[in-house]
């Protein structure tokens, strides 16, 4: 009711805490169940995709810290093959520092087995035009297309 939720210039959905009144209508209607009430601040929150990091050209923390290197981040308009993740630095060669790991990247195209369009699954569009995709092989998609 206060328009606290909005789509930022980078395409991510953000919540303006100064406008949020904590009514939780957005949390109840979220088709993905990712919003929650911060009981201390009495405002609804959700993942911001680390908007401050993205603005500085960094990867979101969930991508940068994924030990299995299963997460990639990118712009769907540039194609899924261009999505990036941290390059795994070989600690026996070169500079294995944390900073080096954060700034060296690999694209999805360069390190993932080839996939078919039928392996790519999108979150259900309930009028919000979600921009997340998942590559699933040998698994059944449990969401709705």
Image (cartoon, rainbow, N blue to C red):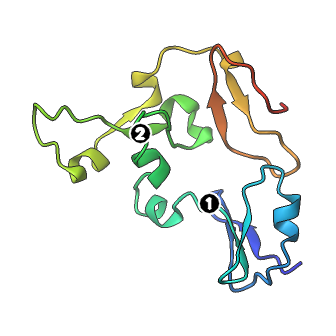
Say which of marks 2 and 1 sits in front: 1
Residue at 23% x, 51% y is 98
What label sits on residue 72 in the rendered view? none
Kind of element beneath mark 2: strand
| Residue with the mark numbered 1 | 47
Q: Which percent across, then down, holds residue 116?
A: 63, 14
Q: Is residue 104 above or below residue 54?
A: above
Q: Which percent across, then down, holds residue 107?
A: 42, 32
State which quarter of the image contains the C terminus. Answer: top right
Q: Is residue 10 above or below residue 111?
A: below
Task: Look at the numbered discs 2 and 1 and tell me whether their residues touch, using CB distance below 8 Å.
Answer: no
- Residue closest to the far front: 39
- Apparent side of residue 50 relative to residue 4 in the rendered image (left or right): left
State which quarter of the image contains the N terminus. Answer: bottom right
| Residue with the mark numbered 2 | 85
Q: Quadrant of residue 16?
A: bottom right
Residue at 81% x, 64% y is 27
Q: 61 or 117, which lies in front?
A: 61
Kind of element beneath mark 1: loop
Residue at 57% x, 32% y is 80
Q: Which percent across, then down, holds residue 52?
A: 48, 67
Which label's residue is closer to the chain start, 2 or 1? Answer: 1
Q: Is residue 5 above or below residue 30?
A: below
């Amino acid at each position: 009711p206060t328009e606290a939720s909005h789509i930022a210039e980078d395409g991510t959905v953000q919540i303006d805490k100064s406008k949020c009144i904590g009514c939780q209508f957005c949390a109840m209607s979220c088709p993905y169940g990712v919003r929650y009430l911060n009981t201390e601040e009495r405002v609804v929150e959700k993942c911001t995709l680390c908007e401050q990091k993205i603005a500085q050209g960094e990867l979101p923390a969930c991508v940068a810290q994924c030990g299995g290197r299963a997460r990639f981040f990118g712009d769907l308009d540039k194609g899924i093959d261009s999505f990036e993740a941290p390059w795994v630095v070989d600690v026996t060669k070169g500079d294995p520092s944390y900073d080096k790991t954060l700034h060296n990247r690999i694209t999805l195209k360069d390190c993932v087995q080839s996939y078919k369009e039928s392996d790519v699954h999108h979150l259900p569009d309930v009028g919000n035009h979600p921009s997340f995709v998942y590559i699933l092989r040998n698994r059944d998609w449990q969401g709705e297309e």
